[in-house]
Image: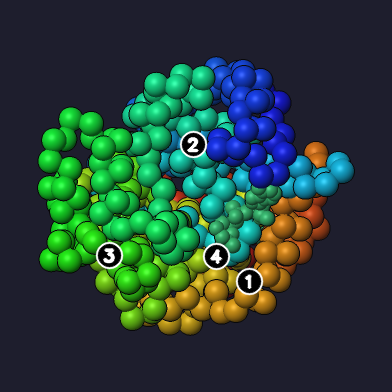
Amino acid sequence: MSEPVIHDAGATHDDPTHLQDAAEDATALSAAAADTTAAAVGMSSAASLPVVGGDLRSIAADRGPLAMAATGIGRDYRIGRGVILHAVRDVSFGLYKGAVVALVGESGSGKSTVARLLAGQERPSAGTIALDGNVIDVRSNRHFRKYKSQVQLVFQDPFSSLNPTHTVGYHLSRPVRLHQPDVKNVDGAVTALLEQVRLVPADQFVTKYPYELSGGQRQRVAFARALAAQPTVLLADEPVSMLDVSIRLEMLNLLDDLRSRLHLALLYITHDIASARYFADEVLVMYGGRIVERGPAEDVTQQPAHPYTQLLIASAPDPDKLGSVLKTSTAAAGSVAARTTAANTGGPAAVGCPFAPRCPLAIDKCRTDDPALELLTPTRAAACWRLDVAAGAS
Ligand SMILES: Nc1ncnc2c1ncn2[C@@H]1O[C@H](COP(=O)(O)OP(=O)(O)OP(=O)(O)O)[C@@H](O)[C@H]1O
Ligand code: SF4
Ligand SMILES: [Mg+2]
């Protein structure tokens, strides 16, 4: 694979400095793509990933065909003189039509960075992303625009993502005009979108401003706006974590309904492994920018194999409740983020298992050698040198 491209912190597709070096980076991206296109296409046809011990199959593939494949994606940020943060490292997974894949991990583990890469808001430093088997290429404006409409991202804070000076009708009619240019009856399309997210009667919501809505209603508007683009892939980044616990279940039920009715490929990002168990087909557990365990939601949450997953489950004492015990306070999240940052910061010299400084099972080998994902069952894998010992602890 080609040398990773290091990006300065904060560069996005929307900022001009980023655009200036787009040509240079596009060359790097397409070089990376050339190296891994075969792998991406291989994954899209076989829907399996080679790991230590065999080929890993995603349980989510049982729901429908592969919509999107990330193959070996990484994202590096330069955060100081000679200090590189590997926010995401060698992450591969597929999103399948009609299936939910959950990306779970504590603050700073790299979840939102993965979502931004998949949404095309940032370029990967390494690896490729393919939609319907086609590796995305930022140089092809036409395809990239189509890609950006087919892959929609919904954030956790619906208030900040809606413009307070515009009505719900405005928020929805704009994307309808943009993404569905053939639609003559825009008002009718807006009504249909509101009904799809169960904001009824629709005419009562069209004229409302965001401040007149509850948090749950605002999040429904955010979903409706994403659906206006008629996406095949929906990336939901902590979509319920800012809502009252009492309405989280209702919102997840709505998402589940949209997934099945519209056959959406859904990435559900959360701190809350309990909700992932309830909602997802496959769970990917991230730590320090990498996937450390993955498999069917029920198996990963009932018999976690990796010491970090075991810690996550132990921190969520009642898995049948949709509580978010991991996100208890800003202070706690801050300290966790600091630990995670330490886990994925460093240059080429960074070695060993990223979880070693916190792992109760760590041995000397863990501090020098980085474990790769290893097949546990045909649909499950974990990256740890001591899976046999950890198995006794779960
Ligand atoms: N633009 C950036 N510049 C520098 N570092 C960044 C940038 N974006 C993200 N990071 C760092 O990358 C790491 C992963 O961040 P990311 O936001 O993806 O984590 P997360 O898992 O989504 O966390 P949270 O649960 O708090 O949302 C963090 O250490 C973060 O500080
Ligand atoms: S490899 Fe070692 S440090 Fe890492 S999770 Fe396994 S036992 Fe813990
Ligand atoms: Mg995040």
Q: Is residue 101 above or below residue 64?
A: below
- Residue designated by label 1: 333
- Amino acid of disc 3: Lys
355 lies above or below 315: above
Q: What coloring was used for the rendering? A: rainbow
**Where residue 31 sits: x, y (%)?**
60, 18
Mark 4 is surrounded, within 10 Å at the Cα level, by few (under 14), some (14 to 19) or many (20 or more) other residues, namely many
Q: Residue furthest front?
A: 165
Q: Is residue 335 visible?
A: yes
Badge 2 vs badge 1, beta-carbon distance below 8 Å: no
The reply to whether dot 3 and dot 2 touch (C-beta < 8 Å) is no
For badge 2, the amino acid type reads: Gly
Q: Residue at x 66, y 25 (%)?
A: 21
Q: Look at label 4 and name its amino acid.
A: Thr
Rendered location of residue 338, percent (x, y): 73, 64
Residue of label 2? 120
Residue at the spot 32% in from the left edge and 48% down from the top edge = 226
Residue at disc 1, CB closer than 8 Å to ligand 1: yes
CA separation in Å, label 4 and label 3? 43 Å
